[in-house]
Amino acid sequence: MKMLCVFSVTDRLKYIGHLDLMRAMQRALRRSGLPIRFSQGFNPHILLSFAAPLSVGMEGMREVMEIPIEGDVSPEMFVEILNQSLPALIRCQSARLVEDSSPAPMSQLWAANFSILPLEYQDEIMAAVPVLLSKTSIPAMRKSKKGMVEIDLRPLIHNVLVKDNSIQALLALHSSGTCKPDLFIKALSQCAGLEAPVPCKVTRKALYTQQFSPLEDM
């Protein structure tokens, strides 16, 4: 069996990198004494996988990870025991058991919902949202293994709402196309007539499948 867990990373710990976050989670799992399944070989390690890396400087409210287990433990007990070993700013919020044959969360990931709070030029940025959405094409440059390549952001922007002085953006996040929040903010700033991208506080609020259902419920 596998435990599908939803967790959050907030406040100061948003500044640690993906590998450091994985190490922190692995250490907490080792300390917890939970019946975690390890790999075979001379250097056994925890077979932990995250649905998607969390960018440095970005809080994650409902991140998803998958942990193979062996032995009996209820999801409620798993959450309680793991939280006792985790740092205070990383919280396991919920968990449920899934079969070993169930697809990995990473393979089902399609989009993410971001809360984007402009720290400057709020009125200009909010006014630029309908201008951006009216475009049929939004060219942008993205760094790839082969260097800088041009992509079209428009089909990768699924939905955008302005709510409570922030922007709620549902953006593509999968292997065949990703709209990173920094590219979205840059395009929005250009629509607002600004010379440089506006600094923003970005929070990843949830992850979704291709059917736009929560990834944690797959």
Image: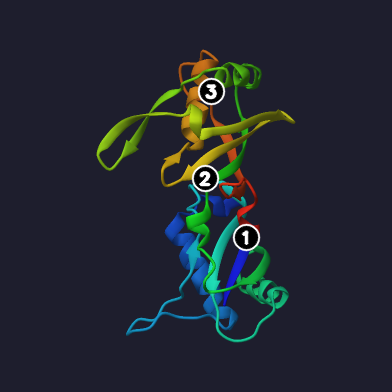
Q: Residue at x 52, y 28 (%)?
A: 185
Q: Nearer the viewer, mark 2 or mark 1?
A: 1
Q: Residue furthest left?
A: 146
In the picture, measured across the screen, residue 207 lies left or right of residue 21, that is right
Q: Which mark is residue 7?
A: 1
Q: Quadrant of residue 133?
A: top right
Helix, strand or loop status at disc 3: helix
Helix, strand or loop status at disc 1: strand
Q: Is residue 177 above or below residue 96?
A: above
In the picture, measured across the screen, residue 16 lies left or right of residue 161, that is left
In this view of the protein, which residue sits in the foreground, 183 or 198? 183
Q: Which mark is residue 15?
A: none
Q: Which residue is disc 3 drawn over?
A: 188
Q: Earlier in the sequence, mark 2 or mark 1?
A: 1
| Spatial separation of the CA atoms under disc 3 and disc 2 | 20 Å
Residue 30 in percent (x, y) is at 52, 79
Q: Is residue 89 above or below residue 84?
A: above
Label 1–label 3 contact, CB within 8 A: no
Q: Which mark is residue 57?
A: 2
Q: Earlier in the sequence, mark 1 or mark 3?
A: 1
In the picture, measured across the screen, residue 111 lies left or right of residue 18, that is right
Q: Residue furthest top?
A: 193
Task: Bin the neighbour count of mark 1 within 10 Å (Cα to Cα): few under 14, some 14-19, many 20 and up.
Answer: some
Q: Amino acid at mark 2?
A: Gly
Q: Earlier in the sequence, mark 3 or mark 2?
A: 2
Q: Quadrant of the N terminus?
A: bottom right
Residue 202 in percent (x, y) is at 58, 39
